[in-house]
Image (cartoon, rainbow, N blue to C red):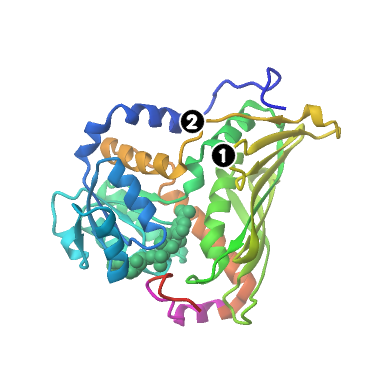
Amino acid sequence: MRANASIKTECTSAAKSIILLYYKNKYKGIDMKEQKIAVIGCGLWGRNIVRNFYNLNVLEMVCDLDDDNIAKIKELYPDLKITKDFNDIINNPEITSVAVVTPSHTHYKMVKAMLESGKNVYVEKPISTVAQEAKDLKELADSKGLVLMVGHLLLYHPAVNRLKMLIEEGTLGDIVYAQSDRLNVNYFKNDRSVMWDLAPHDVSMMSYVIGKEPVRIISAIGSSTDRNDIMDITHLGIEFEDGVIGHITDSWITPRKHVQLLVRGTKATAILDDTLPEHKLTIYDNFTADNTKNITLDYLEIEPLKLECQHFISCCETGKKARSDGDNGFMVTKILEQAEKMMLGDRAKKLDEVDFGLSRVKQHL
Ligand SMILES: NC(=O)c1ccc[n+]([C@@H]2O[C@H](COP(=O)([O-])OP(=O)(O)OC[C@H]3O[C@@H](n4cnc5c(N)ncnc54)[C@H](O)[C@@H]3O)[C@@H](O)[C@H]2O)c1
C-alpha cells in the first residue's frame, strides 16, 4: 500500500532543505560558474564526481597519476584541463575549491595541502582513519574560514531524508533501535578493512536519521577470509545518545547485494531497502502482522551524488557549514577508530605498515 493520509507528509525538518536546494540550483546554473572546482582522483568513484561537477558547469581541472584513468576522462571530456601534479591546482588562483577522491590513506596529506593553499575541500569518506588527523583538518578549515565537507553521501539521499522527516514528525514514536547492513562484493580491498570503506556511510546515516550522536562502541568483531588482519566482514554494536542501540554489518564478500536500514520506534518500524530501484521506504506497524497497515512512501527520485555536489557548491558560495562537515567527519572517524582498536587491539598499528596502493583498479589481489 502506498502513502496515505494516515502518515503526515508535511516537511518539518532541515531534511527538506536538500530537496529545495535541488530546485533552487536547477534554475540557477549560471551562478554556479562562480565556483571553479578541481577533482583529484578519477578512479572508479572519482569518475562519478567528475561527471556531476562537469554537468553542474563548475569543473575546471582533473588531476590523477594514472594514465589509463586520465585517458578515460580525456575521452569523455576532451575540453577539460588535466594534470598529474596537484601543485598545478594549488598554484592556480582561479580554482576556488577541490574534491579529493583518492584512496583514504592519502586523504590527510592531500586535504591539508589544499586547505593550506586556501581552497575549500570536499573529501571522500572516510576523511581519515585517524581521529586526531580528522580533528586537525577540521580545525585547520575552521581557522581559515574554509568549507570542509566529507562525502557522507547518504545524508543527501532523498529516501534517507524522507525517513528523517517521518522520525521528526513522531511517526515511528521514540526511536529504540537501528540496524544498517551494507553487504556487497569488492575484489580490490584497497582499505584497512571493509569497516573503514563502508561503515562511515552507516554511522553517518544512522546518526543523522535518528538525530543522535554515537557515544561508544559496545561490540566490534570482524573476520578476514584472506586470513590476515584486513577484515572483509565486520559487525559493530554502537550506543547512541539516549541509549539507542545501533547494529552495523558490512561485507566485501557477499555476491548478492544487500543494503538496508531498519529503524524501530515505539510505534512503528521503517525499512529502507536501497537495492530497490524505487519505492525504497516502507513503514510497518509494530503490533500487527496485517499487511494492509504497511505503507510505502514517496520521495523525490534525484541522484544523491548530484544533491551532494550541489550542496558543496552552495556551501562554497555562501560560506555555510556543510551538513557533513569536518565535525561530522571527526565524529565518524573517532567511533570507528575505537571499533578498530576493540577488534584488533595492538595489531591495528600493524595496518599502518601495509602498502594499500594508489588505485583500486590496478590492485587486484
Ligand atoms: N561515497 C561513495 O559512495 C564512495 C564510493 C566508492 C568510493 N568512495 C571513496 O572514494 C575514494 C576513491 O575511491 P575509488 O574507488 O575511486 O578508488 P580508485 O582506486 O578507483 O581511484 C583512486 C584514484 O586516485 C588516484 N590517485 C591516487 N593518489 C593520487 C595522487 N597523489 N594524485 C593524483 N591522483 C591520485 C589514482 O590514480 C586513482 O585513479 C575513496 O576514499 C573511497 O572510499 C566513495
| Image quadrant where residue 238 sits | bottom right
Image-based side of 50 in relation to 84, left or right: right
At label 2, the amino acid type is Ala
Is residue 351 in the magenta section?
A: yes
| Image quadrant where residue 28 sits | top left
Is residue 317 in the magenta section?
A: no
Closer mark to the observer between disc 1 and disc 2 = 1
* Residue under the point 52% across and 63% down: 197
Q: Is residue 254 above or below residue 150?
A: below
Q: Which residue is mark 2?
A: 14
Residue 160: image x %, image y %? Answer: 56, 39
At label 1, the amino acid type is Val
Q: Which residues are magenta?
A: 348-358
- Mark 1 Cβ inside 8 Å of ligand 1: no
- Mark 2 Cβ inside 8 Å of ligand 1: no
Q: Can you name the residue that lies furthest to the front here?
A: 75
* Residue under the point 50% across and 43% down: 155
Q: Is residue 221 above or below residue 260?
A: below
Label at residue 334: none
Residue 288: image x %, image y %? Answer: 86, 32
Tell me, yes or no, if residue 67 can be seen here.
Answer: yes
The total of numbered circles placed on residues is 2
* Residue under the point 61% across and 76% down: 345
Q: CA distance from mark 1 to mark 2?
A: 12 Å
SS at mark 2 in the image: helix
SS at mark 1 in the image: helix
Label 2 crowd (10 A; few <14 / some 14-19 / many >=20)? few
* Residue under the point 63% across and 45% down: 241
Tell me, yes or no, if residue 103 can be seen here.
Answer: no
Q: Which residue is mark 1?
A: 160
